[in-house]
Image (spheres, helix red, strand yellow):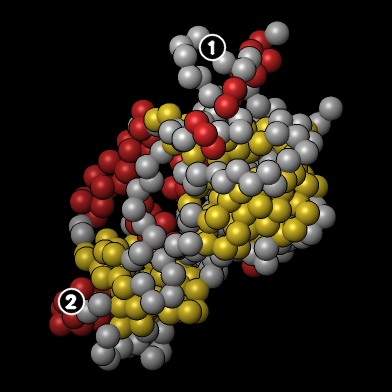
């Protein structure tokens, strides 16, 4: 029998996301995928599964969920209030066992912008162009709605009640960037000012891009209006006609004619994606050589995520699912043996 996840109530920005589609830029389709890719890897680590499995991305608000069979889940990204219908609160950045028939309610974000609900085995909808992620700008998939029922893939593990301390990325900070094709057109003075100024994350932000308003004047360049439309990618920092920069995100367009003062490192994009309106940012320019090394280290950090897991500690008096915890070595509720029998 196929396991399913039913959405009794869906927030206004719920979508199915994975790591996106590569190889289609020439056809006008950007990578897409999760706005916070780091959250996808964190969820995979908590559940001990591959990071390319699809999860539910929740933009600002969650919903009410129910599974047809006992299912492992993990919650990552922007923290949201999560509770079962029996009153049990669920910790964010942790894995849990969601029993069949129990309803999980996830509320509004408490910090950040995008929360993620991962399931053991992932959401097993049909792949389209090599991925399951929704790409709204191109019409691949659609936002999830009340009453939707989604198939869940086969889960090969049984471990739950693990926690992970996430990388800080919810409140702005410094974005590292490398030079782009038009960086030199801004001149040394404007480039230096770009790195000295503090920016405020605007209310205008979505999966395509984030507008950052500078303290003081915008940024101008000589010949900016003559830049030809060319290939652009997530992370590129386009400066519009009024001198305001936009950081392009996972679902950005594939070509554009605005000049680019730089490009944010992929490992820093979750910080740009998660910040709420009013968050403060700054930029710092690094060389291509430095960027390659920083990205290498970030990739190594992703591989080490499973080593950072630790048991989820809770007050035994509030543990309605007490038998799912391994309180004494070798003694469990037996659910971890189900798949082996």
User: Residue at 79% across / 59% down in the picture?
Assistant: 146
The residue closer to the viewer here, 141 or 187, is 141
Q: Is residue 10 visible?
A: yes
What element does badge 1 sit on? Answer: loop
Name the quarter where the C terminus is drawn. top right
The vertical placement of 129 against 338, above or below, is below
The answer for how far apart the CA atoms under marks 2 and 1 are is 58 Å
262 sits to left or right of 272:
left
64 sits to left or right of 111:
right
The residue closer to the viewer here, 79 or 263, is 79
Rendering quarter of residue 97:
top right
The vertical placement of 27 against 196, above or below, is above
User: Residue at 62% across / 54% down in the picture?
Assistant: 106
How crowded is the residue under tag 1: few (<14 C-alpha within 10 Å), some, or many (20+)?
few
Report the residue marked by disc 2: 196
Report the residue marked by disc 1: 331
150 sits to left or right of 113:
right
User: Residue at 54% across / 29% down in the picture?
Assistant: 160
User: Residue at 46% across / 11% down in the picture?
Assistant: 329
């Amino acid at each position: 029998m196929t396991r399913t996840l039913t959405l009794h109530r869906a927030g206004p920005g719920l979508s199915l996301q994975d790591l996106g589609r590569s190889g289609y830029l020439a056809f006008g389709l950007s990578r897409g995928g999760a706005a916070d890719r780091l959250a996808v890897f964190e969820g995979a680590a908590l559940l001990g599964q591959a990071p390319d499995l699809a999860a539910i991305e929740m933009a600002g608000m969650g919903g009410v969920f129910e599974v047809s069979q006992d299912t492992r889940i993990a919650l990552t990204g922007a923290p949201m209030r999560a509770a079962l219908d029996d009153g049990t609160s669920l910790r964010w950045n942790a894995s849990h066992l969601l029993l069949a028939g129990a309803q999980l309610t996830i509320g509004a974000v408490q910090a950040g912008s995008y929360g993620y609900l991962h399931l053991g085995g992932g959401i097993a909808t049909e792949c389209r162009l090599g991925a399951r992620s929704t790409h709204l700008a191109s019409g691949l998939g659609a936002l999830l709605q009340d009453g939707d029922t989604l198939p869940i893939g086969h889960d090969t593990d049984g471990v739950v009640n693990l926690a992970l301390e996430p990388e800080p990325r919810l409140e702005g900070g410094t974005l590292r960037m490398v030079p782009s094709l038009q960086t030199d057109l801004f001149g040394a003075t404007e480039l230096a000012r770009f790195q000295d100024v503090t920016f405020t994350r605007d209310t205008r932000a979505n999966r395509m891009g984030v507008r950052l308003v500078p303290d003081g004047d915008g940024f101008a360049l000589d010949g900016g209006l003559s830049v030809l439309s060319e290939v652009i990618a997530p992370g590129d920092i386009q400066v519009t006609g009024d001198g305001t920069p936009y950081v392009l995100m996972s679902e950005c367009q594939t070509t554009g004619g605005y000049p680019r003062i730089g490009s944010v490192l992929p490992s820093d994009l979750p910080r740009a994606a998660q910040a709420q309106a009013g968050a403060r940012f700054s930029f710092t320019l690094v060389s291509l050589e430095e960027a390659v090394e920083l990205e290498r280290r970030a990739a190594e950090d992703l591989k080490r995520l499973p080593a950072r897991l630790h048991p989820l500690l809770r007050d035994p008096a509030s543990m309605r699912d007490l038998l799912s915890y391994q309180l004494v070595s070798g003694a469990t509720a037996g659910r971890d043996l189900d798949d082996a029998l």
